[in-house]
Image (cartoon, helix red, strand yellow):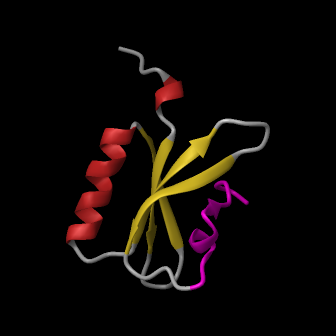
Amino acid sequence: MMMNGSRLKYRVEVLGDRGVTERYGPFNEQKAREFFEVEESLGGTARIVRLEEGIRETWMVVAECGDWGDREAKRGEVPAAGR
């Protein structure tokens, strides 16, 4: 069974022990929230981001837990993976 790629607009970003952001996904919204809830329950620093439609690839923060400090999440815009 093939999945509709347009529904996979979410990813979960987890702040690792060394300050490196690890990205997981793409997911649909339900799977992203499930993944996020596990990280939250473990006391981790994580966030769900959603790919916004448009000319350039922009990820917007949907939910976050933990302390992101002065990271880009405070502005609500997250750089695309690989940048």
Q: Is residue 56 left or right of residue 46?
A: right
Residue 1's image quarter? Answer: top left
Q: Nearer the viewer, residue 25 or 29?
A: 29
**Residue drawn at the location 47% of the way across and 50% of the way down:** 11
Residue 69: give x, y in percent of width and height.
53, 85
The magenta region covers 70-83
**Residue drawn at the location 43% of the way across and 82% of the way down:** 67
**Residue drawn at the location 62% of the way across and 42% of the way down:** 52
Q: 4 above or below 78?
A: above
Residue 78's image quarter? Answer: bottom right
Which residue sits furthest front?
75
Check if residue 5 falls in the magenta segment. Answer: no
Q: 39 above or below 60?
A: below
Q: How many marks?
A: 0
**Residue drawn at the location 58% of the way across and 44% of the way down:** 51
Residue 72's image quarter? Answer: bottom right
Q: 8 above or below 14?
A: above
Which residue sits furthest left?
41
Q: Is residue 5 left or right of residue 31?
A: right
Which residue sits furthest top?
1
Q: Nearer the viewer, residue 80 or 70?
A: 70
Q: Is residue 68 left or right of residue 37?
A: right
Residue 62: give x, y in percent of width and height.
46, 55
Check if residue 74 falls in the magenta segment. Answer: yes
Quarter of the image where the C terminus is located: bottom right
Residue 53: give x, y in percent of width and height.
66, 36
Residue 9: give x, y in percent of width and height.
51, 38
